[in-house]
Image (cartoon, rainbow, N blue to C red):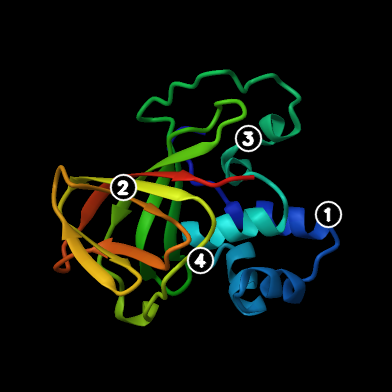
Amino acid sequence: MPNGEIRVGEKIKKLREDEGISLEELGKRIGFSPSVISQIENHLISPPLGILIKVSRALKVKLGYFFAEFQEEKGETGLEEPFTIVRKDERKKISRVASKEGVNYGYSYESLGFGKKDRQMEPFLVSLEPRSAGAGEEGLSSHEGEEFVFVLEGEMEVQLGNHTDVLSIGDSIYYDSTIPHRVRCAGGKPAKILAVIYTPQ
């Protein structure tokens, strides 16, 4: 699916329904309202990585499940290998833009590790953008695991608990994901980062 956007919401809905879990029950498990989950499932918004990690744990699948092709998920084609090369036109994009309202939620991300068998880390190329006024304020996220971020372009503001800092091109940060955290572009200007997420299963 070159440059194709993945409809993560459809995968979440199918997995949830296959497991016989209601919107309300999934909401309780991950700490979000059923209406937010419904918007995600209906492709009105794409989930931030923090929510996606919580959904994967609640539904007992690896984070990479949401970026795999159907055949790869079922292990039917043997496409997953001990290594993977992702060409620049093969990245799988997830955009956090509400398609109906045109609201920009602050970032989009592309999966760089799909196809690697039994992977423990998920690398992403993340584009940070100023959030639309209608997007509201995003809270801090926390989950099991670790995250590494390297700034490629622009400046990034990172908040870890009560600590806030600004990282510039070439700066990096590595932290425990259990610390409530949030990253966004600094100074109202776009930025681009490489983010690697480890989530224990």
| For discs 2 and 3, the disc positioned in front in the rendered view | 2
Q: Is there CB contact under 8 Å for labels 4 and 1?
A: no
Seen in the picture, residue 50 relative to 24 is either above or below; the reply is above
Image quarter of residue 96? bottom left
Give the Cα distance between marks 2 and 1. Answer: 35 Å
Q: Is there CB contact under 8 Å for labels 3 and 1?
A: no
Image quarter of residue 22? bottom right
| For discs 2 and 1, the disc positioned in front in the rendered view | 2
Give whichever of discs 2 and 3 has the lower sequence position: 3
Q: Is residue 39 visible?
A: yes
Residue at image coords 63%, 59%: 55
Give the Cα distance between marks 4 and 3. Answer: 21 Å
Q: Which residue is mark 1?
A: 18
Give whichever of discs 2 and 4 has the lower sequence position: 4
Give whichever of discs 4 and 1 has the lower sequence position: 1
Q: Is there CB contact under 8 Å for labels 2 and 1?
A: no
Q: Which residue is mark 4?
A: 45
Q: Is there CB contact under 8 Å for labels 4 and 3?
A: no
Residue 31 location, x and y as percent?
A: 61, 74
Q: Which residue is mark 3?
A: 69
Give whichever of discs 4 and 3 has the lower sequence position: 4
Name the amino acid type tagged 3.
Glu
How crowded is the residue under tag 4: few (<14 C-alpha within 10 Å), some, or many (20+)?
many
Give whichever of discs 2 and 1 has the lower sequence position: 1
Seen in the picture, residue 163 relative to 60 is either above or below; the reply is below
Give the Cα distance between marks 2 and 4. Answer: 24 Å
Name the amino acid type tagged 2.
Val
- Find numbered disc 4 in the image and state the secondary structure of the residue it sits on: loop
Residue 21 location, x and y as percent?
A: 81, 65
